[in-house]
Image (cartoon, rainbow, N blue to C red):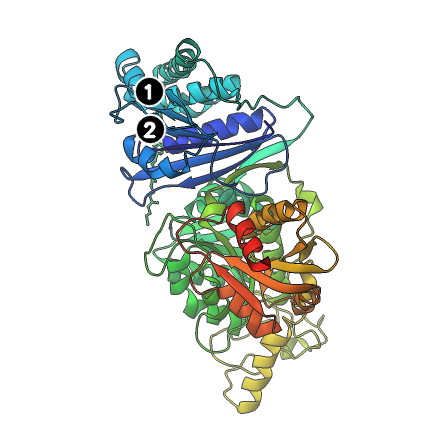
Amino acid sequence: MSDLIIRIGGEGGEGIISAGDMVAEAAARSGLEILTFKSFPAEIRGGYAMYQVRFSKDEILSEGTGFQVFCAFNQEALDKNRSQLVPGTVLVYDYPGGDIAEEVKIEGVTCYALPMSKIAKKDLDMYRAKNMVALGALSFTFDIALESLKELVKEKFGRKGQAVVDVNLKAIDAGAHFMRDNHKKTDPYKMGSVAKTGKDVIIISGNEAVGLGALIAGCNFLSCYPITPATEVANYLAVRLPKMDGTLVQAEDEIASLANVLGASYAGAKAMTSTSGPGLSLMQELLGLASMAEIPCVIVDVQRGGPSTGLPTKHEQSDLFMACHGGHGDASRVVLSAENVSDAIELTVIAFNIAEKYQTPVLLLTDGSLGFRTESIKRPDPRKYSVVNRDRFKAGGNGDAPSKYLRYKLTASGVSAMSLPGDAGGAYISTGLEHSESSAPSFTPEDHARMSDKRFNKLASVVDFVPPPEVQGDGPADLGVISWGSTLGTVREAVNQARAQGLKVKALHPKLVWPLQEKQIKAFASTCKKILVPEVNKQGQFAEILRGKTGVDAISYPIYGGLPFSPKQILEKIKEVLK
Ligand code: COA
């Protein structure tokens, strides 16, 4: 096998997430590429939790379609996945002695009964270790990193004491031995490891990648309020920022978070907040202040299912309208969206660079699936990123007499030098009020028009500052696919498959979603007979923006079930549109 998807399902609280994380990390350590997908309930205990790992010896572009192997911890998990247990798949399930009452036989499906609850309870006297019994069995049967897994048990559970480590090591062996002694392997799936290639990789989640990108960009201030699925951004930075002379402030709510960020940035910090949809809603008033006062800031929105508290742990891409248009008045901002974990690092650096260069709020959109997803990626080299800092006021150095500092001076680029509190000669008034070049409040028609133009015109060159969107495929095509965010990886895989089947399909992968890189989008569309826009929201938000801004006749393909696209879904839609 060069590509294998294993899904584990059970009850929240049974250690599904730990088990999935550990097998993914063990596989990555043994040289395999990994990409994970987690879905769990909003409750801390109970409800259906699922963890899926895709392993490969080659690059992985998306979560993939379905699974080859499903491991059911209970009846509910089995019921939820039964329709996907198609001929050729494998089921490993907790029987006898667990929640599943009957032996399972499904035509064409290899079913391995594994009494994981019974082994954990009766043989090991620790029900918690059920997940490790399952992992031992899976690792043995599909030849995935058994030794690395044991190392990880020592590392991850060491803090819980040697007795816990010992039981878990025994559990891994017990699962492996049960499979060896009780089942003859009849399925074809075997992963193996990859010969050491000197690959220098890190295993990191999308949320952690945002934190890492922020550090590379020189971020030294984060203020946020915890919210699923964005909290890990802060968790990652909480232990790292202080070591780099940075500060993390957990605020009382999201309004205070962005207020803290604006204050810190006004005083010279490179500042960021991380949140999800409901938090971004609360920040809209202050987003306007950032635009009006031209204060650099980065706002990361790890999107989740909405509206309201909605589906807090589920995937959706439905904050695009709010990111681009939210708030009152004509508030300028830039919106980027990340495709995968590597991209989350890269785009966070770009987000800071844009915020600093253009003195504007920059929103970076990721989503639940990407935020929670873990990937093994090439270790980034911070020296390879260029980092931009804001244009700082120097007394007399900006062509003004020191007493005549014009904070909002009208310049050809639209950007005017920013002083920091205490800079001699650099005092100015920073408020949400409209102002003149000097920063003094002004409500004249001339100043409001001039300053509105300044705030928007300075963003005109952002479309050239961000690398142009990548085109996948060449020549004229019967269909072009344009998408955004983490859907891009799935589109890449589907388009590769479509092209391999001889279909004339290509794709465009924009990362800047506001303002749009209109020139490149129109050029791409002119080479395609039709344009398809898949995205995970009800309204087809990106398709709507594309139509409005570029006139491209986009065929919207929205899904909204709390799950990301699979490559199969997109490939089928491509074929349907081409019919
Ligand atoms: N031996 C010892 N300890 C083990 C173990 C084993 N074999 N397997 C798991 N554990 C421990 C884990 O280390 C973890 O302990 P910790 O809390 O000290 O880190 C704990 O058991 C839970 O296991 P874990 O694998 O992390 O989670 P889970 O798969 O059981 O699922 C969640 C629990 C993650 C689904 C649930 O707790 C959760 O967080 N739900 C989402 C809540 C949310 O965000 N709601 C939205 C609010 S708006």
In this orientation, does residue 407 appear?
Answer: no
Mark 1 falls on what kind of element?
helix
Q: Residues within 10 Å of mark 2 (few under 14, many from 20)?
A: many
Q: Position of residue 303 (x, y in %)?
A: 44, 54
In this orientation, does residue 132 appear?
Answer: yes
Q: Is mark 2 within 8 Å of ligand 1?
A: no
Q: How far is the residue under mark 2 from the one under mark 1?
A: 8 Å
Residue that lies at the very extreme toward the right in this rendered image: 475
Q: Residues within 10 Å of mark 1 (few under 14, many from 20)?
A: many
What is the quadrant of the N terminus in the image?
top right
Is the C-beta separation of discs 2 and 1 under 8 Å?
A: yes
To which quarter of the image does residue 87 belong? top left
Residue that lies at the very extreme toward the bottom in this rendered image: 445
Which label number is shown at residue 293?
A: none
Q: Position of residue 132 (x, y in %)?
A: 39, 21
Q: Amino acid at mark 1?
A: Met
Q: Which residue is mark 1?
A: 116
Residue closer to the observer: 62 or 205: 62
Mark 2 falls on what kind of element?
loop
To which quarter of the image does residue 168 belong? top left
> In the picture provided, is 189 more to the left or to the right than 75?
right
> In the picture provided, is 352 more to the left or to the right than 135?
right
Which tag, 2 or 1, sits closer to the chain's start? 2
Which label number is shown at residue 73?
A: 2
Q: Position of residue 44 (x, y in %)?
A: 29, 40
* Total numbered badges shown on the rendered structure: 2
Q: Amino acid at mark 2?
A: Phe
At x 64% / y 78%, what residue is drawn? 409
Q: Position of residue 453 (x, y in %)?
A: 60, 80
Please tell me in which quarter of the rendered image ligand 1 is found: top left
